[in-house]
Image (spheres, grey):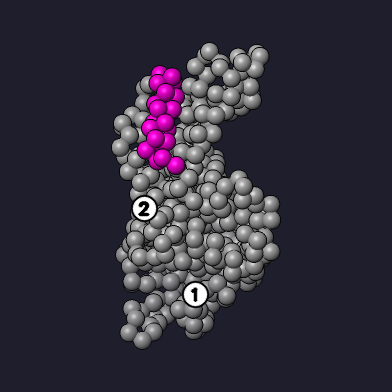
Amino acid sequence: MVLLAGGQARAFEIVFERHGGAAFSLAYTISGRRGVAEDVVLEAFLSLWCTGARYDRARGSVRSWLLTVVHNRAIDALRSGAVHEGRHVRDEGCFERMEAPGGTEVEVARREGAREVRDALDELPTGQRNVIELAYFGGCTHTEIAAMLSLPVGTVKGRMRLGLTRLRIAFGDPADAIA
Amino acid sequence: MNDLDAMFDPRDCGADAGAYVLGALESDEAEAFRGHMAECVVCSDEVATLQAVTGALPMAAPQRRPATALKRRALSRALGEGESAADIPDRHRLRISLPVLTRSIPSAARGAVAAGGFLAAVALTVGAVQLSKGSASPMRIVPAVVINEGQSASAVLQIGSGQAQLVVSHMPAPPTGTIYEVWLERPGKPPQPTSSLFSVTSSGAGDVDVPGTLTGVSEVRVTPEPLGGSLAPTHSPVIVVALTS
C-alpha cells in the first residue's frame, strides 16, 4: 500500500491481480450484469488508487476495504436502476466461471475460506439464508423483503439477526475468511 | 438514560442489529439506530460482532474471472493514460491495422443520420477481413460505421470462435444520464437488446463483449440509452456494424 500510495503502477497491478477476481465476482453477483460489474470494479480500484495514501491498515485489510466499496457501489447501482429492470437475463456464458487452479498458499487458503463461507450460508435454515441473501446481494430493505415473502417485518429482522449469529458461530473468526 | 441503563437496555433493542449490518434498514431507521448505538453498548457490541460476519459474505459470491482487459483498463485509467493502441491486445493490434478502407455508408447508418440529426457522420466502412495467426482460429475484424460529432472515433467488431467483442477508440462519452447499449439487428425483426452496456474512458476507449450468437444478424448497433438500458432503442445508433454472411 505504501507503493500504491506512491503511485506505482506495478503495485496497482499486483493489488488488482490479488483482489480483482473477488471484487468482480461480488459486483457481478449483485448486479447480474457484466458491464455494470466492470464499471463498479473500475471505480472501486480507482478509488483505492486515489485514496491509497489515506488507507488505514488498522481499519482492516485492503481486500476487506475494497470489497466493502464494491458492495456499496454495486448496491447503489442496483437501486439507482443502472441494471436493466425486468430483464432477468444474466450474462451467463459471456465469461467463464473462475477455475480453481493451483496457486500460492495464500490463494489456496482464500479459496478454502470462501468455500467455508458458502457452506455455512448453505447450511442456514432456508428462511434465514433467503433474507440475508436478499439483503446483502439483492440490496433489498427489510420492508421490501417482508412484502416479497409475505412475512411480518419483525420476522424478517429476526431471521437476519439469527442467521448472522449462526454464521458468526460457524465462521469462528470471520476475519480469517477474508484477510 | 444513565450509564447502567445504557449498558443494559431492558428493551430488545438489538432486534435491528442484523438488518442494520446488512444495510437493510430504511434510511431513517438506520439513522435512528446509529443514534441509539451511541448510547447502547449492547447494540454497538452486537453490531461490531455481526459486521465481522458481513465482512466475510463477499466470499459467498460464486467466483468468476473478470475479462482480461479489465485490469488493463483499470491501470490505464489510474495512470490517466489513453487506451487506444496501447490497450488493444497484441493479438488484435496487428490485425486492426490491415483493413483497406472504402467509403460507403450502409443504408441503416444513412437513415440514422437523417432521422437522428447527428451533425456529422464519420463513415468508414471496410470489408470484413479474415485474419489468422499461425494455426489459430481465424479472427474476423469488421470495422464499424461510427456516427458522431467527432472525427477520430472508430470501432471494430472482433469476431472469434464463439465470441465477439466490440472495441471502440476515441468515442465521446455517452450523454449524461445514458449508457451505450449494444443491439442485434435481424432482417424483418425488431432490434434485439443485449446485456452489453458500456461507457468509455476519458480517452474514449472501451470494449464490450457482444453476447449471444451472431447467426442471422445483419447489423450490430450501439445506441445511447438510459442508465438501466432499454428493451427497445430510444435513440438513433451511434455505431453500426454491418455483417455479411
Q: Chain of mark 1?
A: B
Categorize mark 2 by other alpha carbons within 10 Å: few (<14), some (14-19), many (20+): few
Q: Position of residue A26 (x, y in %)?
A: 45, 49
For this view, does B115 lie left or right of residue B149?
A: left
For this view, does A40 lie left or right of residue B138?
A: right
Helix, strand or loop: magenta stretch: helix
Report the disc number at residue A112. 2
Q: Position of residue A126 (x, y in %)?
A: 31, 32
Residue in the picture at 55% in, 29% down: B45
Q: Is any atom of residue B13 visible in this view?
A: yes
Please give the range of residues in magenta.
A152-173
Residue in the picture at 45% in, 78% down: B91
Residue in front for this viewpoint, B95 or A138:
A138
For this view, does B225 lie left or right of residue A114?
A: right
Q: What's the distance in space between the residues labelled 1 and 2, CA to CA?
A: 33 Å
Q: Chain of mark 2?
A: A
Tag 2, which secondary structure? helix
Residue in front for this viewpoint, B113 or A159:
A159
In which quadrant of the rendered image does the N terminus of chain A lie?
bottom right
Q: Which residue is mark 1?
A: B89
Q: Please tell me whether mark 1 or mark 2 is closer to you in this view.
A: 2
Q: Is residue B169 above or below residue A64?
A: below
How many marks on residues?
Answer: 2
Q: Amino acid at mark 2?
A: Glu
Q: Is residue B119 above or below residue A72?
A: below
Q: Position of residue B141 (x, y in %)?
A: 43, 75
Q: Is any atom of residue B234 visible in this view?
A: no
Q: Amino acid at mark 1?
A: Pro
Report the disc number at residue A154. none
